[in-house]
């Protein structure tokens, strides 16, 4: 992954001040200003735009599959999971190109000859997530969760996430994407994560973590629900 750089120059009273900010390098990437989205303090939940964290091969597979379909205008963010069949299935986390983006899971099948086709497209309703209260491999079926290539969160959300997981027990969580933010006596974040249960015979899965950050900067995970991926890939 390429490093993301932002450079701004400002001329004030004949003096030039140059500030250079570099966010991450290689596989560890801090979110860019492009990822950040200001949320008005109305209490409404706002979907947050994120950057693309696909390899060139994954992007090409997605582009070939969605060309000429209803998913053609979707922006893929990450590969959530893969499934070995007579070929390979990919579950892509995607956003719409709307002013207030919506989230979707697109399933792409790549056959042994390398031809890619869109086989399923399902919306992610953040107010009615398909989840399970119990950590179970059944929520993944024959799908194998993919480890996130980078922490694709805006700066403020990344800080809140880091503070929140420090004292969280039961599941080790790694962020994939910020799904939404909400201003409500502080800031609420909902984050798509890869999670691993901390127990004998650990179970890997996809989780949606809800985080509340107080105005003083303290943060906690209020819930971490395992996503029932099988409900979104049919």
Image: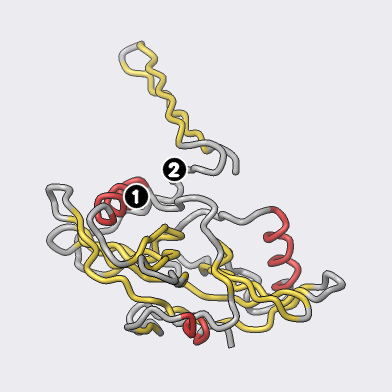
Can I make out residue 77 in this image?
Answer: no
Quick check: 164 left or right of 9? Answer: left
Would you place residue 4 above or below residue 38 in this image? above
Judge the density around disc 1: few (<14), some (14-19), many (≥20) Cα neighbours within 10 Å.
some
Outermost residue toward the right in this view: 113
On residue 30, the disc is: 2
User: Marks 1 and 2, Cα distance to the nearest angstrom?
Assistant: 8 Å
Can I make out residue 36 in this image?
Answer: yes
Q: At numbered mark 1, what does the secondary structure look like: helix, strand or loop?
A: helix
Quick check: 123 left or right of 156? Answer: right
Give x and y (percent) for residue 184: 16, 64
Residue located at (35% from left, 11% from top): 14
Q: At numbered mark 2, what does the secondary structure look like: helix, strand or loop?
A: loop
**Which quadrant: the N terminus?**
top right
Outermost residue toward the front in this view: 200
Judge the density around disc 2: few (<14), some (14-19), many (≥20) Cα neighbours within 10 Å.
many
Which residue is labeled 1 in the image?
A: 158
First in sequence, mark 1 or 2: give its number.
2
Q: Nearer the viewer, residue 195 or 227?
A: 195
The colour scheme is secondary structure
Are the two marked residues, 1 and 2, in contact with CB atoms closer than 8 angstroms?
A: yes
């Amino acid at each position: 992954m390429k490093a993301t750089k932002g450079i701004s120059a400002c001329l004030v009273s004949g003096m030039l001040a140059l500030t250079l900010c570099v966010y991450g390098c290689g596989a560890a990437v801090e979110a860019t200003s492009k990822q950040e989205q200001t949320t008005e303090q109305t209490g409404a939940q706002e979907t947050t735009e994120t950057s693309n964290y696909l390899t060139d091969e994954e992007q090409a597979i997605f582009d070939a599959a969605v060309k000429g379909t209803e998913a053609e205008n979707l922006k893929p963010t990450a590969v959530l999971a893969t499934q070995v069949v007579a070929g390979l299935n990919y579950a892509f986390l995607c956003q719409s190109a709307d002013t207030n983006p919506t989230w979707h899971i697109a399933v792409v099948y790549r056959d042994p000859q390398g031809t890619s086709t869109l086989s399923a497209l399902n919306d992610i309703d953040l107010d009615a997530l398909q989840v399970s209260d119990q950590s179970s491999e059944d929520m993944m079926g024959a799908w194998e969760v993919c480890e996130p290539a980078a922490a694709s969160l805006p700066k403020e959300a990344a800080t809140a996430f880091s503070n929140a997981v420090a004292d969280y027990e039961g599941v080790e969580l790694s962020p994939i994407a910020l799904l939404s933010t909400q201003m409500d006596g502080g800031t609420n974040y909902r984050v798509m994560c890869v999670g691993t249960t901390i127990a004998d015979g650990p179970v890997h899965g996809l989780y949606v973590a809800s985080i509340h950050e107080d105005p003083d900067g303290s943060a906690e995970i209020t819930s971490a629900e395992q996503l029932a991926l099988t409900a979104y890939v049919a």
